[in-house]
Image (cartoon, rainbow, N blue to C red):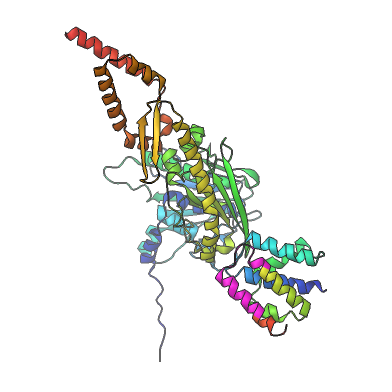
Amino acid sequence: MSHFSDASPDPKSHIKTLMRIGYTMPSAVSDILDNSITANAKNIEIHSLPGLQESNISILDDGDGMSPNELIHNMRIGCKDPSDERLRGDLGRFGSGMKTASFSQARRLTVISKKEGEPVCAAVWDIDRIETENTWCLEILDKDEIESHPLLLLSSTKKCGTQVIWEKLSCLNKTNHSLDDETILASTLSDLGDYISLHFHKFMDGKNKRSFTINNAQLQGIDPFMTKSPGYQEGRSEKLRCKGGHIEINTHVLPHFKRMESTPLERLGGANGIVQNQGLYIYRENRLINAGGWLGLAKTSQLGALARVEVNVPSSLDQEWSTDVKKASLQLPPRIKKELRKFLSDPIKRSKRVYTYRGKQDQANKYWNIKENENDKIISYQISSENDSLTDLFRGASKEQKSQLIKYLGQLAENLPLNHIYQKMSESPREIDQENVTDALLESIMSRVFEEEINE
Amino acid sequence: MNIDNLDVVVKVAACVCGKDGVISQTEEEAILASISSEYPSYSLKRFNQTLDDFFDDDLQLEDYLEQISDLNLKVFTIKLCEFSASADGLDIKENIALHKVKLIFGEEL
């Protein structure tokens, strides 16, 4: 006769597994922000006060807050069934996000919360204590302990809200040779600001608008489609009806680099970032989950750099889209892949057209000819022989000078630094300035001639 | 015509078009255009509600087909399914579902 034995996980080992679930610092903070948004917070503040002996991070919101019982329930790992249907706008999924995200970045998690009409309450998960005692012992703070908490930011006068505090930060990766805590944290917070500005940009504008700050500095949304920039092109869009709402697909083509303003270009990672981040932008309940990449549906190419496909998915489809605990990745269901393929060709084609148009403009240049041999698939850049100045120069030159000039011009064309131009045009096209090269050339030749005369 | 019967017809068409859990905008517009031209009193609001109900139902294609007994409605259902499923190209799963509708209704037509 078979029998059952208790094989529940060992807390000490289990917590170590939960700490290594694969969050990055920005994705971990984003998971906490998801909870704030679900709790209808309008103001979300991230604080990491400098000058303290031990660095810490606090995330404070003015959302609905929790009663003492709700707090204890929500501090439990896996407090919600992932297969339960979520309300629209609920960004949660497994009921583990806050805890696993926090454990991946800090060894001590304190949650202080207040619900309207309820007393303020607080609970603490301390990994050191779990490891020492080998039990899931959640510490509940009493009123005095909460009020005297050194990191308390949730004002007692507030009707409701929640403060998540991370202490004993493990995300700082300190080694013997690393920078001090504050320098690392400052750089981490800067990356965090960019991440939040991109991934929550739909919550920073329009009817869903919320305020996000890091150390009281207001974050501005980064629109990955540059919809307000001159030269932006809106493409096809479609709604697919599914359980729980619609999947909305919109296609976008960014303006050419030359028409982009420098600030939005830099915020999107510069020209290199624009090329690398072409592809699908998948939003779950308005929160960006996948920022770029074609997920195997198309190839990344220089000419497709400006193509973007926006996909908005309701959270009711989490099961089908295999959303993971971190909500940082998902898999496209086969039917959606099929539907998306119909949309890809249009923005990619238009992105290519933007580039090709620029190419044709270059062809009109009276100094250079671009020869494209369709049969041999060879493109070569040749100095134009039709140029009037060059013709005049040849007319006045002796036979020997003509021969020297032809030789020189041939070598000039052969030695065009194409690889360097390609690299710089991809990485930093705005830094290329060809306007004053004639003056520079003249100056350089004159000084060389002058030096030779002195030497003679 | 009992308007409740039309709800079932819409659900059959949704079943054929939405074999993978998704109905494209083109298919949706085709269902609505087809049903509105034949039954103008069928409102957009009712149509949207029916499709939402469809995604919440656990019923299979056969269960919906069982609920349609009127011969004219069966003919219309087949036409509707053919028109809407092929609106953005008939894929293999949609084709199988369409064949099933024809097979089940075909015995009586």
Relative to A170, residue B26 above or below: below
Residue A37, x across and y down, in percent: 58, 52
Relative to A338, residue A429 above or below: above
State the residue in front, A80 or A396: A396
Residue A324, x across and y down, in percent: 47, 61
B9 falls in the magenta region: no
Quarter of the image for residue A405 reads top left
The structure residue drawn at horizontal position 59% and vertical position 72%, both measured from the top left corner, is B95
- Looking at the image, the residue that sits furthest to the left is A456
The structure residue drawn at horizontal position 33% and vertical position 15%, both measured from the top left corner, is A442
> What span is in magenta?
B83-102
Relative to B60, residue A352 above or below: above
State the residue in front, B2 or A29: B2
Where does the C terminus of chain A fall, quadrant-wise? top left
Is A332 situated left or right of B25 in this image? left
- Looking at the image, the residue that sits furthest to the bottom is A1
